[in-house]
Image (spheres, rainbow, N blue to C red):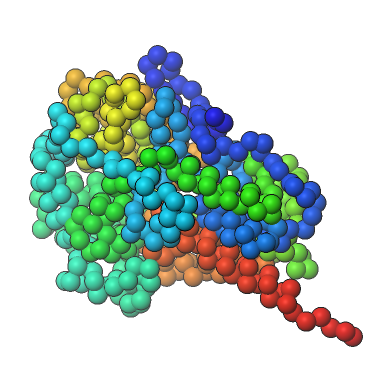
Amino acid sequence: MSRTKEGHIWTAQIGSKTGMETIGAIIPPQSYPHGHSEVFDAIVIGAGYAGLVATRDLTIQGHSTLLIEARDRIGGRTYNGIVDGFNYEMGGTWVHWSMPHFYREMSFYNMQADFIVSQTPGGKHDYFTLNSESGTTTMSHAEEAKLFGKVWGLFCDVDGVQATAAMPYPFDSRQNRETTAYLDKVSCQQRLDQIRERLTHEEMAMLKAILLQMGGGPLDRMGLLDAIRWWALGNWTGTGLNDIGLRYRLKDGQSSFARKIFDHSKATSKLSYAFSTPVQQVTEKGGMVTVTSRTGQTFKCRKLICTVPLNVLASINFTPPLPSLKIMASQEGSTNHCNKVHFDVAGADLISWSAMSNPGRGVICALSDNLTPAGDTHIVTFGPSPSLKNGIRLQDGIQPIKGSLEHILPEGQVIKKIVYHDWNTDEFAKGTWCYLPPKFVESYLDALRKPHGNISFASADWSDGWRGWIDGAIQEGTQAAKSVVEELRASKEKPRSHL
């Protein structure tokens, strides 16, 4: 199987190494069936889900399309590495049939039977651990769900009717514009301060851990409006978001799904692609768009779709320059710089265990997720942004990473393997999934969605609905491709002057 240069693996036997097997790595990295000097109908920058879906929709409509990607693989901030026969989801993971754009693609590629459940009941340590400043508490998972629902529901009940009036439809999340404009100004920290007296110390620790797992932190940089949108996507119930967003993943891995979309494009004979090709410059002149790579390669097209993440957008030079609001939005960026790390712990004792910790020592959430082929427990962990006092930097070595989980593990457990991707030092991500700061939506969201001449923009980072999730990326790619197809068709049908 092909390998990517990305991802990090540690075991006690071999120490640390970089790179892993993945079906998402593309070999050869470049392919131009009709030559790279042709003028393409469209160029798509970025081979994450937004870019893959946009490329597929363009090519199946018969448009010559070049897909340019800085990495050596497809998937963007979502891919799975295969280590010792087990799929480790390095980025986006959990999916559900309540994610409409995602599930449409799954059913289209006949993958609806590929779901597996992360949680396994009945293990030796079948309970939940909550670490707080006042000590460690264990409880059943039913009690965990009750506590989670209580604090999360209280936090999100901003209108007295469980936010059903504030956000009645999360795929048109600003339908109640006056209310959402107000909520956009409020930080998660300010909302915590409003309800602080109604929470015990343990409840506050649980709620802070929930929020930091969602958006990395700090809490005063996390907007309340994104939390309310996530709550609404969970059907306005205490555990709805967990049921949808933390329960099911793909047995064959996200890269297998992404590969089906990519291979569909290849089958049209309309696809050219260039991987390991970071973009330096995008220039539009005389109705033609020219893309220049860092190595000086140039490609021309009539229409361009740019799908790079919000935090990366300002690093590409555009001529004419991007509107100031787009640049300011990228510079402000997503607040989410959390860490995601996989641990394999010896044996099956922890197969039913989970934990949350605040303040913690680098891990605020730990979730058991099936057994590896070696019979060890696979645990997925999330940590707060490294800038926080209880955060860690993954580039500082393996000992702080190990210690972050050992701090909350039951006694006698042995960590055998650690697998992760450092999205914060990744120049093509500069963070993890999108979580927006206060005052961002009203200031920048509309501007991010607007085209710039013959250049369209598509990213999960500014979708509605499942913004920051796989479904949001697919939605954006679908919508951008539809607009470009219509524009290309209109330009070909425009009558020519006989003068």
Looking at the image, can residue 31 be seen? yes
In this picture, residue 435 sits left or right of residue 1: left
In the foreground, 184 or 389:
184
Determine whether 201 is above or below 129 in the image.
Answer: below
Q: Quadrant of the N terminus?
A: top right
Instruction: List x then y, in percent, for residue 173.
Output: 36, 70
Determine whether 323 is above or below 350 in the image.
Answer: below
* Residue drawn at x 29%, y 24% as measured from the top left: 376
Residue farthest to the right, as pictured: 499
Instruction: List x then y, in percent, for residue 373.
Output: 34, 25
In this picture, residue 417 sits left or right of residue 457: left
Q: Quadrant of the C terminus?
A: bottom right
In the foreground, 62 or 226:
62
Residue farthest to the top, as pictured: 13
Instruction: List x then y, in percent, for residue 129.
Output: 16, 37
* Residue drawn at x 16%, y 60% as measured from the top left: 154
Residue farthest to the bottom, as pictured: 499
* Residue drawn at x 75%, y 68% as measured from the top left: 287
Count of residue discs: 0
* Residue drawn at x 63%, y 49% as measured from the top left: 266
Determine whether 154 is above or below 88 in the image.
Answer: below
Instruction: List x then y, in percent, for residue 23.
Output: 52, 36
For residue 356, which quarter of the picture?
top left
